[in-house]
Image (cartoon, grey):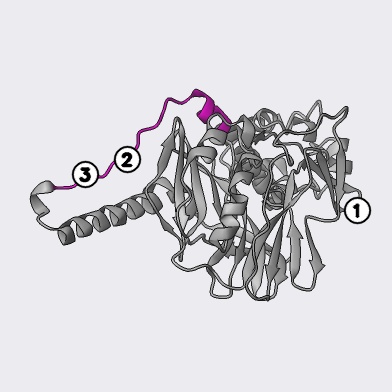
Amino acid sequence: MSTASALRLDLAGLRTLPAQVWGGVRLVPLVRDEPLPGLRLHQELYGDGVGVVRVAPHTAYVSYIPHGFVADWGAGPAASYGTLLHGAHGTPPPVDAVPVRFHRRMVRRTAKHRLRFLPLHLALEGYLSLHFGGPSIAWEEWSQQALRRGLSPRVEEAYCGAEVRGLADALRVFEIHPGQCGVLLYTADALAAAFAVPHPDDYRALHATLVQDLYGELVHHYALLSAPVQDFAPHLDAERIHSTADLREALAEQRRQWADFHTGTMAAGLLAPQYTARTAYRAGDFTLSRFLPAFVPRTEAHIGEAITAPDGRIAYLKTFRLSESQIRRGHLLTHLAANDWHLARTAAALSLTPADLTARLSSASLAPLLRHRPPQRAR
């Protein structure tokens, strides 16, 4: 993995169309006027088993991995592969046990111009491996488990899209627009995920995979508990419309206002912050990266992965919204690592007492890092 670099997400080349609403789910189409040339995506099905990926010697990533994405670049025009959720007859075959499938790395080149990667899991593994080695200095406040094994095992919970209320129905009934290459997905008008691909045919083939993706705790709860969201209907001033040209201009102005409102307000929590990105693979002129936020508590935060074109445009994007507890864990681990895991210095950097910091570590499910009986000066 390369050194970190700053990244700011820019949806240049993608424009938003008016949203479609189903209960508490809002889908905002992302449309390209022209497909982004030189890259195509299709799906590689793995079934409903558990996936195990070796990410380092003696270290594995274990999750529900129903499919991988395969990126083709450097070739001429190509047709997208089709996609099936369960099988030829639409129902999963009965199984006596959960099958386990082993994968060779998160990103793997399978041919000269073909790259297989595990969508979203590349980003999630980046979050799980955040300062995974644990304390770099054997301060006496840390447990022997923390010093010997670091954060292993590191566990986070997520929900399959099939468990997000209303999502499967929304994806089934919503219209796919001509030129649509992505979608911004909201539950209770909180941005849950962003998904973009280079070509409209790729999106049509991969649209249904959104119900197999993983979503955070916040997204699941918002979808479960929220009331139906309001549909935004355009309001035209009839007194200013005297011809077809006036009507056309009024509609164009409504679309511009919608796009400005969406990118400047509704999706600002994703698009405004600066991210820390690491390159996972360079596929010809395209770059596959995963990115992490700044982990500011009580602030919306997303992790994700992206493929960028030589001119910087996003060819592929997939994001995951973190819960507040996940943001707190990232915040605490980042500050601990920045202060060489010295508890008193980290507490001072956060304007806390050591006792307050140990309490926050415990509430953030990081208590196994601490000794069971911390020294008096740490308390």
Question: Could you tell me which secondary element the residue under label 3 belongs to?
Answer: loop
Say if residue 211 shows up in the picture: yes
Give the label, 1 or 2, closer to the camera.
2
Residue underneath mark 2:
232
| Amino acid bearing label 3 | His
Q: Is residue 254 above or below residue 287?
A: above
Q: Is residue 223 magenta?
A: yes
Measured from the top left, where is residue 31 in percent x and y?
45, 58
Residue where numbered disc 3 is placed = 235
Q: Amino acid at mark 2?
A: Phe
- Pointer 1 residue: 57
Q: Quadrant of residue 220?
A: top right
The residue located at (47%, 68%) in the rendering is 34
* On screen, residue 184 above or below 187: below
Q: Position of residue 35 (x, y in %)?
A: 52, 67
Q: Are marks 3 and 2 in contact (CB under 8 Å)?
A: no
* Left or right of 263, for residue 163: right
Total labels drawn: 3
At which x and y percent is residue 225?
50, 23
**Which element carries disc 2, helix, strand or loop?**
loop
Q: N-terminal of the two: label 1 or label 3?
A: 1
* Near-viewer residue (352 or 295): 295
| Magenta residues (range) | 219-237
Q: CA distance from mark 1 to mark 2?
A: 51 Å
Q: Quadrant of the N terminus?
A: bottom right
